Image (cartoon, grey):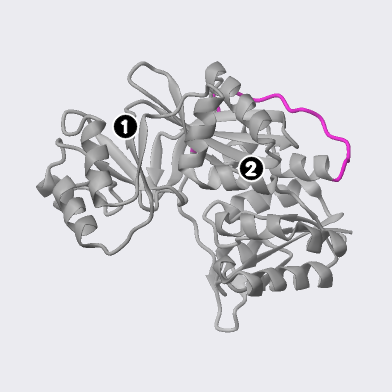
Amino acid sequence: MTTILITTASGMGYPSFIRYLKTSLGKEYRIIGTAAQEDAVGFAFLDKGYLTPKAEDGKNYLNALLEICQKEKVKLLLPVAPQELLLIASNINKFQKINTMVLISPLESLRIAENKYKLFNFCKKKKIPVPKFIKAKDYKEFKKAVFDLGYPEKEVCFKPTISSGTRGFRVLSEKDDKLIRLFKNQPDSTLADFKEVCSILKEAKSFPDLLVMEFLIGQEYTVDILADQGRPLIIVPRTRKKIVLGTSFVGEVVKEKDIIRYSKNIVKELKLNGIVGIQFKKDKNNIPKVLEVNPRVQGGTILAVAAGANLGYLAIKNTLRENWKVPKIQWGTKLIRYYDEVYQDKKGRFFKL
């Protein structure tokens, strides 16, 4: 029996991803997982779950992962959390010594993808469109960048150069009505008041480097990709029509030729490997521009599965050099996500109603 370890069992999209993966792989495979929380929802869907330190704990987390891989004779490790990718890639030889394969991109590629400023400069050199951007290291540079990009006539956004999801992402807009934002907008609204942001940054002793960017007004996309050492094998773009806490709740698989072409170039130039997500958004001229490259499984990857591309299954088969066929994508397939529950008794056992 082949054992696969997939980390981050606490992720929102984890249960669906694991459920369909287990169905596809069959009884010849065991799927185990890890999380830093005892009540991680993904534990309810795994053959076995392990509690580990947080990825940010560095050496302690790495040692726990190595111990689990050795104990369970893990054939293949799929890292999912952005915080663990550099750590694991930097210690890939330790996993090789215990005969555990790791589905991950090269270390240098991860370093570029992690840092949005490096990524945008990389894409510009390769003639791949990105938003207009300026890096700001302090309050004065931030304020100047915001005005240089056209504020207040134009909406401007910013984000730390190193962050994941919508963490630290804010949109500065003169159209922002504070009363509406206070009483009608959802708490996860990304709109921010320029004066409030300036007052915070002005008093801060230090803050992370910020990427100040033009705000793109068009449709947003995520592209789910299966890559093999820089070779794009499957590319499935999907719209992000409704986003809650950074996760797609409504979307549709669409055949966008420009986005597919740019995605191929990024995979080739960065030599990406495994399951990869790339985010695009269109500008006012309908030109798709790169927002992020996430060299890992995305929370909405399950939509690609529903459209015929079971990327987890295919990634495992491809890495283990087992036979598989390129699927036919069912363009137009839609995702409508909803909340579901699992329960846990006082002994820690999961159950469902």
Q: How crowded is the residue under tag 1: few (<14 C-alpha within 10 Å), some, or many (20+)?
A: many
Q: Residue furthest left?
A: 179
| Residue 284 is a magenta residue | no
Q: Which residue is disc 2 drawn over?
A: 109
The earlier-in-sequence mark between 2 and 1 is 2
Whether residue 122 is visible, yes or no, is yes
Q: Amino acid at mark 2?
A: Ser
Residue 41 sits in quarter: bottom right
Q: Is residue 190 left or right of residue 160?
A: left
For the record, the magenta segment spans 320-335
Q: Position of residue 9 (x, y in %)?
A: 60, 62
Q: Is residue 167 left or right of residue 15?
A: left
Q: Which residue is disc 1 drawn over?
A: 214
Q: Return the mark for residue 296.
A: none
**Kind of element beneath mark 2:** helix
Q: Nearer the viewer, residue 88 or 149?
A: 149
Q: Position of residue 232 (x, y in %)?
A: 70, 29
| Residue shown at 45% from the left, 27% from the top | 289
Q: Position of residue 338 (x, y in %)?
A: 45, 48
| Residue shown at 16% from the left, 33% from the top | 152
Task: Determine whether 130 is above or below 294 in the image.
Answer: above
Main secondary structure along the magenta-highlighted residues: loop
